[in-house]
Amino acid sequence: MLLWFSSLVCLVVTVRCASLNIPSEYANLYDALQAVQSDDEILFSSGTFSGSANCGQYLGVDSVTIAGSGSSATTLLCNSSEVIPLSIEATTSVLKDLTLTN
């Protein structure tokens, strides 16, 4: 008698894709970057965002989108020529629809 055994492997993948809103949920870019995970998006409302918590920040998480409400509507204003507004060392991350100014 020949018996065949078959196994079925089921893999469930949960993808977390959260929107982290500045300033309604997070006060500034620093706070949002502390909470961000891969595949999340950080969304700025319209306005000008300045100060050390919004400038000189580092993104090291892959597949993150940082977006404003339009390049003429959202500005990260860093009042120092010595500060890089945002350092990104993450693959497949996107920065769009905002203006970075030193």
Image (cartoon, rainbow, N blue to C red):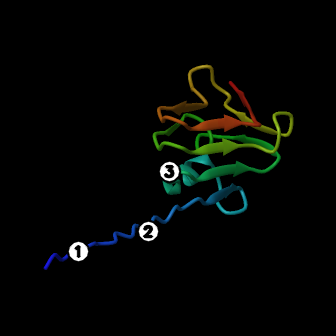
Residue 4 lies left or right of residue 29; in this view the side is left
Of 64 and 22, nearer the camera is 64
Q: Amino acid at mark 1?
A: Phe
| Quarter of the picture holding the C terminus | top right
In primary-sequence order, the first of circles 1 and 3 is: 1
Q: Amino acid at mark 2?
A: Val
Instruction: Check the image and name the residue furthest to the left.
Output: 1
Mark seen at residue 5 = 1
Rendering coords of residue 41 (x, y %) = 63, 51
Instruction: Check the image and name the residue furthest to the front.
Output: 1
In the image, which is nearer the foreground, mark 1 or mark 2?
A: 1
Marks 3 and 2 close (CB-CB < 8 Å): no
Residue 22 lies left or right of residue 35; in this view the side is right
Vertical arrangement, residue 34 with respect to residue 7, above or below: above
Mark seen at residue 38 = 3
Marks 1 and 2 close (CB-CB < 8 Å): no
Which structural element holds mark 2? loop
Mark seen at residue 92 = none
In the image, which is nearer the foreground, mark 3 or mark 2?
A: 2
Of 48 and 94, nearer the camera is 94
Q: CA distance from mark 3 to mark 2?
A: 18 Å
Q: CA distance from mark 1 to mark 3?
A: 39 Å
Marks 1 and 3 close (CB-CB < 8 Å): no
Which structural element holds mark 3? loop
- Dividing the picture into quadrants, the one containing residue 22 is bottom right
Q: Which residue is mark 2?
A: 12
Residue in the picture at 57% in, 45% down: 64
| Quarter of the picture holding the N terminus | bottom left
Of 28 and 66, nearer the camera is 66
